[in-house]
Image (cartoon, helix red, strand yellow):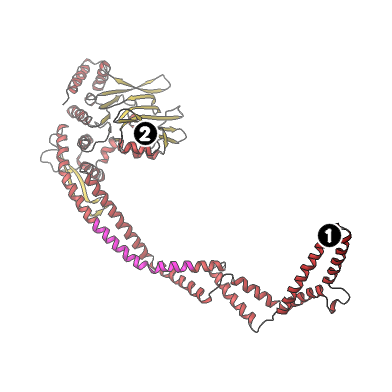
Amino acid sequence: MILDLDIDGLGVIDRASLPLGPGFTAITGETGAGKTMVVTALGLLLGGRAKSGTIRHGHERASIDARWSIPRGGHLEARVQDAGGQLDELSDDTAELLITRQLVDSGRSKAWLGGKSVPVGMLSEFGEELVAIHGQAEQWRLRSESAQRDALDRFGPDTIFELADAVATSWDEREAARAEAERLRAAEYERKNEAEALRVLIDLVETVQPQPGEDEQLRSRIDRLTHLEDIRIDVQTALEALRGSEAYLDARPALELLATASEALQRAAHNDSGLRELAERVESARLTLDDASLEIASYVSELDSDTPGELQQLNERLAKLNDLMTRFGPTLDDVHTRYEEAGRRLLELDGDDDRIADLEQRAEAANSELASHAAKLTDARTAAAGELADRVTTELTALAMPHAHLEVRVTPAEDIKRHGADRIEFLLAANPGAAPVPLGQGASGGELSRIMLALEVVLAEANPVPTLVFDEVDAGVGGAAAIEIGRRLQRLSRHTQVIVVTHLAQVAAFADNHLQIAKSSDGNVTSSNITPLTGQARVDEMTRLLSGLADSDTGRAHAEELLTLAATKE
């Protein structure tokens, strides 16, 4: 439950602290004083989106802090710790959790859980387990089939949620298998074209059988054969320059000259050791050139000529490789990669027919499971529907609707949906002999308020939420009906914390904790303050709610009578 709530810079509220605690807390005040801001603050604290103008004029930011009491050792404590938050011990059984939400005028928002900064969305996850907020919007939502189905499922045993999850899982599996099979069938033409293109690639590559690096080898061989005579002349010239020939009768060969130079330097080095290194370098150069001349001579002796037709064959082979690289390259390595990928992809495409058959079998199996789970879910909902209708009808009798009867009807839907095979409909017969009609057609706003409250009373006893917040749940009612709403809220607070924003004294009288929001103005700025009411101050506020005048003697007597009535617990 919420222990206290602090609000700073939100709407008309400058700064306020709400002591809450267990039981039934009523919040009253004049119209425009900011009662609904309390509900807005809780909504923001639990991950809700901030509307324009939420931050108070003149403030750079708004912040909301609340201290919660949660059970020790439960899954909530574990989730807080998983998020990195800290808890303070309150007792052996309970721990204190601090949740903070901050808004700044730039539109940014921050959140803290147990002192740890967390995404705002995480607050929503916790909020679902901590608080249920009901306002007039929820009354209208109660007219929808989904809200009625949710209420029935909440009332039923835990097996309903287990069956609903099983139905949803089977439905998802069936739809996924059907969608994938349909996608494959729709793409059959594209698959055939892709497979044909892949086979062309594979056939061409296997026909040519290119080898890694073969294109570079071919270009090198073609260049050599194309310039064979020029190569022969240039290499022979180099060899003759090194070794000598008839063409160089007037010049000594390079090797002979180097040998003469080397011998001369070696003789000189005997007389001057400083020349020794230079002599060794010249001798090394002579030896290097001598080795080179041997290799050149070997190259000349082995230099072959173009065999008949070889150059044409090489060019034809390179043309085939170039064609492959143009179509599937740009390099020969890319051609080999595309070839390997094509083989794997072709196996996939050829297996798509088998995949379609497998997907159809999976869809059929999921559909059989779906039908089985949905039938069990229908039985469970049908069994719970009668009991829920009877218990809500009993509550409506106590809420000044003695002749009303709620019917919870479970009928087959046209087909199985993700939520099951049922249409859930709440119908109300407001008077004896009247035919039941859907809530969306026959229930007034006041009747919807009481139906929603009756549902919450019944659901709270079956599956309580730690805190229930009602924003003017008593709208559209008064008199005896309002008193009974107050009684029911009081009764509901025995199982869960109840916080109610109300404008009716008949409801506020039953509260354990009465808070008043009052606005004040200094002529320039209007602000609201929150005050806990006890004793005479509470009587004055009750009198104002009843008569509009805080000093009305008649109203005061009525207020005291209501408080006395409310103090007599059921």
The answer to whether 501 appears left or right of 258 in the picture is left
Tell me which amino acid carries mark 2.
Leu
Tell me which amino acid carries mark 1.
Arg
Q: How far apart are labels 2 and 1 at the CA level?
A: 93 Å
In this orientation, which residue lies closer to the viewer: 411 or 302?
302
Does residue 206 lie above or below 480 as drawn? below
Magenta residues, start to end: 340-369
- Residue at left 23%, top 26%? 507
Within 10 Å of disc 1 (Cα), the crowding (few <14, some 14-19, many 20+) is some
Magenta span: predominant SS is helix
- Residue at left 29%, top 61%? 362
- Quadrant in which residue 543 is drawn: top left
Q: Residue pushed farthest left? A: 433
Within 10 Å of disc 2 (Cα), the crowding (few <14, some 14-19, many 20+) is many
Task: Tell me if residue 363 is in the magenta stretch.
Answer: yes
Residue 551 horizontal/vertical position (percent): 26, 15
What is the quadrant of the N terminus in the image? top left
The answer to whether 62 appears left or right of 480 in the picture is right
- Quadrant in which residue 250 is drawn: bottom right
For label 2, the SS is helix
Disc 2 vs disc 1: which is toward the camera?
1
Report the residue marked by disc 1.
276
Task: Tell me if residue 355 is in the magenta stretch.
Answer: yes
Report the residue marked by disc 2.
45
